[in-house]
Image (cartoon, grey):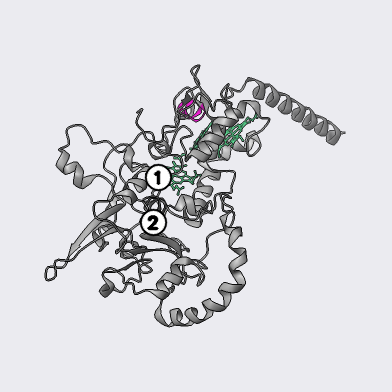
Amino acid sequence: MKDDNDAINSERRTFLGVAAGITAAAVAPGVILHTVAAAPRAEPVTSDVRWGLLIDTAKCVDGCSACVDACNHENGLNLQVMPAGESPQKWETQKAVWIRKIKLQDNQTGRVTTLPLMCQHCDDPPCVDVCPTGASFKRADGIVMVDRHLCIGCRYCMMACPYKARSFNHAEMHGQLTSVPRGKGCVESCNLCVHRRDFEQESTACVDACAAEGHHAIVFGDLKNPNSEISQLLNAMPSRQIREDLVLNTGVRYSGV
Amino acid sequence: MATVLKTCLVAAGLVWALAAQTVQAEEMKRYVVEGSRAATLPSCVEPTELMRRQHMEFIKHQRIATVHEGIRKEKYGLSGCVDCHISYSAERIPQPINQADQFCGACHAFAAVNLNCFDCHASVPNGTPLDAAAAHEAAGVAAQVQSHRDGEDH
């Protein structure tokens, strides 16, 4: 599948920055249209959009885990139970997590930054390169995910991921949510709440939870739409990719790091 | 003369075959479970004959369209089958659809088909509050059924 996720390449950004001012005025009244939600998608997703997140680490609060908890709830990760006889320490490192809170400390200045780290939805995802079955794939709209019908659980993708964003599901599951099937023997990770995407909902569970806490540290949106909040913020404030040296063109960007 | 006789024989044969089929159809075991929404409806998402033989093709085709292309507005979704064919116990608790006495499970047990779909997929409507509510509403059990969303009662 060939698509063209060149959103936020720098020349294009400069160009869009100029164009944005003009189109924004014309499109603004239409914004109301987008708030009517919940229609299931009838057409295939296209590369006209590229979903992404912008995380403002200055607003991310140390000790808060609202995004992680919301993700666990939304995706049924809280349904996992520790297999009988497993040591709790081992379980801590093995249970599936789709978002982790990370703390960075600058050893010279002592400055501490906290941030949520999830699948970075790379434009050039290493997990897709290494997958022997085609289970690890990038959807046309930029979401990197696992087709669990094809996944054989080899975990190459987990080793290839520079962000440690993927988990292997070790335990048998019960009581799964209809919208998020999950099961033993497959690799899984953040899919930008794909079940919400396809029903035209506006945000992800982590974004909603962060906003509900009053932090508003995470913004979700279309990186290719110059009028989206996320594009405008990216245009206005400095942001970085984690491990930009790998040139993966991540869909998740961080400011303040 | 010979041709006329042949035609008659063929015609008679056809009539016999049709009659036999009708008898067969009446005797055929049906799997739609009492108390499911499907039991109140005249037809499946495709004619019954087609569903019996080809549901697996429909579902697998749907699966690719949904997972890879994000198409959700389709009639062959697995969660759709579960919503419509699910039945409820006397206490109005939804019965896992792959159970040997339930819709998918009973026929698969008879046909010796083993599925792993429900290792991952919810075997009862257990959705986002939205679709679970709709399913329970449709089955007339909205008040009795509690969402298992948090898995606390498992």
Give me the residue at 56% from left, 43% from top: B76
On screen, residue A33 versus residue B82, left or right, reads right
Give me the residue at 84% from left, 36% from top: B3
Residue B108 covered by magenta stretch: yes
Q: Nearer the viewer, residue A115 or A193?
A: A115
The residue beneath circle 1 is: A74
Query: Residue type at mark 1?
Result: Glu
Q: Nearer the viewer, residue B122 or A24?
A: A24
On screen, residue B143 versus residue B24, left or right, reads left
Q: In the rendered view, tell whether residue B44 sits above or below residue A240.
A: above
Q: Residue furthest right?
A: B1
- Most common SS among magenta residues: helix
Give me the residue at 55% from left, 39% from top: B80
On the question of residue A220 being in view, the answer is yes
The residue beneath circle 2 is: A145
Q: Residue furthest left?
A: A108
Q: Point out residue A148 in the picture as x, y percentages from the top left corner.
A: 38, 49
Give me the residue at 45% from left, 33% from top: B123
Q: Nearer the viewer, residue A149 or A48?
A: A48
